[in-house]
Amino acid sequence: MAGFRNSAREFTRIAVPYFRSEDGGPGRVLLVTVIALQLFQVWLNVRFNAWYKAFYDALQNKDWDTFIWQLGVFSALAAFYIVSAVYQLYLQQWLQIRWRRWLTSRYLGRWLSDGTHYRMRLKGDSTDDPDQRAAAAGSPGQRQKADNPDQRIADDIRLFINNTLDIGISLLGSIVTLVSFVVILWNLSSTFPLVIGSQSFNIPGYLVWAALIYAVIGTWVTHLVGRPLIKLNYDQQLYEADFRFSLVRLRENAEQITLLSGEAAEKERLLDRFGRVVGNWYGIMQRTKRLTFLTAGYSQVAVIFPFIVVSPLYFAGSMMLGGLMQIASAFGQVQGALSFFVKAYSDIADWKAVLNRLAGFDASMDWAKGLDDRAPRVQLVSDGGPAMTADELTISLPTGQEIVHVSGLAIEPGERVLVTGPSGSGKTSLFRALGGVWPFGAGTIRFPHGAKLLVLPQRPYLPLGTLRGALAYPGPDHAFTPDEIDEVLDATGLTHLRDALDETAYWADRLSMGEQQRLSIARALLQKPDWLFLDEATAALDEPAESMLYRLLLERLPDATIVSIGHRSSLVVFHDRFLALKPDGKGRHRLTPVTPDEGARDAEEMGLSLV
């Protein structure tokens, strides 16, 4: 019961907001219309039930006129049924795409806001082994782990909406059908007694009780046989997503894999992941086979069960053929409505697995957003003065281990600051905190109100699309004039790309790392930030090219504050202040002001060359 309540809460939280949204009005109209058409079809089935008696009585009586008339009645009822079924499906599909569009936009908005997508990656999964993650599925801790968000948004939302409408509308139709035909079947039971051998018994509603007992037994056995499918379907989605993600990673890292001759190792890893897909699928096959044996046998027996119960009356001459067919039809409708869960159990298992995955995705996003209450973050304040300040700031790993401590830091506008430190000292984590995306630690970082920040990582991001769009990112493709773009490409040594600006390609593969870093600098020159952070953003270039680009930054962005992470001697002349991360004896590194000479000694100890 507790599991049912949890599922109900999760379903309500995911499904209800759409019908309260700005698109909820049309959505409610479509939903009500689809439900009305379903109810209309139930009414038509009631009319068909009455038609059975008249039609088969006409056959038994060889009444030609009534026979022809009933054919006309059937044609009219069938036409109404066909039209209502077609438009019910059409309007339901219309509702599905509107609901999916809104829910996809909502999930994308939550996932991409406030760095949530990045913070969710920082948390990661409890294990890299999909088998262990699947084994923990459904536990409170695991439900906050969200593997493969792309699948949650692209596939699970679609499946959730489609299955919710299919199962929900079918369930409603079954309930209304049950209420409608129970009345008919009860009345028919009172007209004809139960005959067993030569004995007859007047049992009120015995046909209803027979259908109820048959359906309850079938539902109970089906649940026992089919229950493992919920976890098997959950696991299958997980394994399929892991296998697909591994294929995407191979494509994105094709060059590195080829240079390392890693194809054989990658094939082994991919086959291992696919082996989990196959192994779990065999489990689904075995369980589905048992369930299908049960449901197919149940459905076939249900066809003749009402005839077995009522046929003694017919052969005794107490009932016309039409009455027999009417009872068989009504019994079938009641038994079918009561057996909804028997027939839909596999679909319900799929739906429950999807619901669990979306609930886990929600929980993971809630966790990421909740970090704002305890995370260091960029706070833009109008009374913070012109400088960037950070006092008693601690940067930690996701495990809680403190790695960097900053006290009394103040960087004035226009300064050029070079940050050095040994590998693993937390330089990149510090830059992430300055950029407002690293959530682990304590303290506050303040920037001048309205300051425009730009952080250039060592590996630039090139979105799918054109080079013109990559230069303008995250703004619109035509944020800059063609002359501005051509001039900055020439200045950064990318003249050969001018003719390919509007070509759509996977540019992260087409361009070398050095070309990508030049493109990143060109982006900074176009966007003109007030504060520019470079995390070894020119490390893939040779020293003359690196010096050329830094000189270009100083010339084109004379008022910008530039803070760099780097180790090359060529960077010293472009900075007027130096900070180093040094061990403080407490397992952390403290950001400490140093002179170029002190920095040179530190660099020499690290095997680097700063001057």
Image: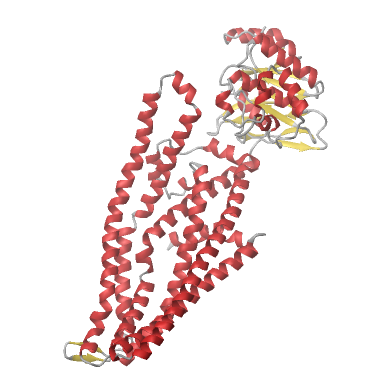
| Figure quadrant of the C terminus | top right
Figure check: 323 above or below 339: below
Q: Is residue 81 visible?
A: yes
Figure check: 441 above or below 174: above
Question: For this view, does 530 lie left or right of residue 254?
Answer: right
- Residue positioned 55% across, 34% down in the render: 398
Figure check: 330 above or below 250: below
- Residue positioned 44% across, 57% down in the render: 351
Observer-nearest residue: 73 or 263?
Answer: 73
Residue 337 on image: x %, y %: 39, 73
Figure check: 190 above or below 530: below
Which corner quadrant of the image does residue 171 belong to? bottom left
Coloration of the structure image: secondary structure
Observer-nearest residue: 175 or 129?
Answer: 175
Question: For this view, does 33 lie left or right of residue 168?
Answer: right
Residue 154 on image: x %, y %: 52, 47
Observer-nearest residue: 395 or 247?
Answer: 247
Which corner quadrant of the image does residue 431 belong to? top right
Residue 506 on image: x %, y %: 57, 30
Q: Residue furthest left?
A: 198
Which corner quadrant of the image does residue 306 belong to? bottom left
The mark total stands at: 0
Q: Is residue 408 visible?
A: no
Residue 342 on image: x %, y %: 34, 66
